[in-house]
Image (cartoon, grey):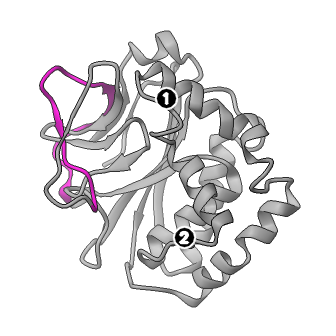
């Protein structure tokens, strides 16, 4: 399996990168170490100058709104996973999905980098960051039987048979999500522009370290960018 970025993406987003980490995982409902991370998240964000009032002033958060505008959607309605995560955190609406998902969400917030993950057993063929195709459909996680019509302006992750994540990192599909039966996952760290707080490499290091603390085992990692637009992740 390969992870690739379609060349057309770099025309509008020359700094686009994907940090990736392949890991064996142990998915459970919760983990005390992760729960402690979640409880301390607001304080740690405040320590780096991020609050409910200031988060949209940080270029690593605000920059995604420009990205979403360029994808043809209203950025105040369709938010990057990072902005959505920070807003929930400061409202006290702390999520509880699983130990692994909650862990990478905490790492995402603290590094100001959007992150996601897919169950490798549910992927078919290569995983590609590309523009949408006319007539393509997206089946979102946690939305019942709803279906979204994809626009050719939308950037998304897709394998050979489905859209895996719509609007770069806005929402995952229910057909590749992590569950308690997941044994191996591919974690993704997104960059669309030159970041100020943390690099993709630093985000990967933090993610690997925290996942190891909850019983996961990092296998290999790398970065896909304009110089190296394809990487073997199998």
State whether residue 143 appears in this view: yes
Rendering coords of residue 164 (x, y %): 27, 45
Please give left or right for residue 40 compared with residue 225 in the image: right
Q: Establish if 209 lies above or below 152.
A: below
Who's the residue at 51% across and 33% down the image? Answer: 75
Residue underneath mark 1: 68
Q: Is 217 left or right of 161, judged from the image as shown?
A: right
Residue nearer the viewer, 122 or 132: 132
**Left or right of 134 in this view: 210:** right
Q: Is residue 54 above or below residue 37?
A: above
Circle 2 is placed at which residue position?
103
Check if mark 2's residue and mark 1's residue have beta carbons within 8 Å.
no
Give the extent of the magenta segment.
122-142
Residue at 67% across, 40% down = 61
Q: Residue furthest bottom?
A: 32
Q: CA distance from mark 2 to mark 1?
A: 25 Å
- Secondary structure beneath disc 1? helix
Residue occupying the point 45% across, 68% down: 101
- The image shows residue 174, relative to residue 132, as above or below, that is below
Q: Residues within 10 Å of mark 1 (few under 14, many from 20)?
A: many
Crowdedness near tag 2: few (<14), some (14–19) or many (≥20) residues, C-alpha within 10 Å: many
The front one of 189 and 138 is 138
Q: Main secondary structure of the magenta part?
A: loop
Residue 225, can we see it? no
* Place of residue 178 in the rendered image (x, y in percent of width and height, measured from the top left): 31, 66
């Amino acid at each position: 399996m390969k992870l690739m970025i379609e060349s057309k993406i770099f025309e509008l987003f020359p700094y686009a990168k994907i940090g990736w980490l392949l890991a064996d995982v142990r998915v459970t409902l919760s983990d005390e170490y992760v729960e402690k991370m979640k409880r301390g998240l607001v304080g740690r964000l405040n320590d780096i100058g991020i609050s409910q009032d200031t988060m949209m002033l940080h270029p690593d958060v605000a920059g995604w709104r420009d990205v979403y505008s360029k994808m043809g959607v209203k950025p105040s309605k369709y938010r990057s996973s990072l902005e959505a995560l920070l807003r929930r955190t400061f409202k006290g609406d702390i999520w509880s999905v699983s130990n692994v998902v909650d862990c990478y969400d905490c790492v995402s917030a603290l590094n100001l980098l959007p992150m996601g993950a897919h169950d490798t057993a549910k992927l078919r063929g290569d995983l590609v960051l590309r523009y949408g195709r006319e007539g393509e459909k997206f089946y979102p996680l946690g939305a019942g039987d709803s279906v979204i019509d994809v626009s050719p302006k939308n950037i998304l992750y897709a394998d050979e048979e489905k859209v895996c994540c719509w609007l770069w990192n806005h929402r995952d599909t229910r057909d590749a999500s992590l569950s308690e039966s997941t044994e191996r996952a591919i974690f993704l760290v997104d960059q669309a522009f030159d970041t100020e707080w943390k690099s993709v490499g630093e985000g990967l290091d933090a993610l690997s370290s925290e996942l190891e603390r909850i019983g996961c085992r990092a296998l290999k990692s790398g970065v896909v960018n304009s110089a190296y637009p394809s990487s073997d992740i199998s």
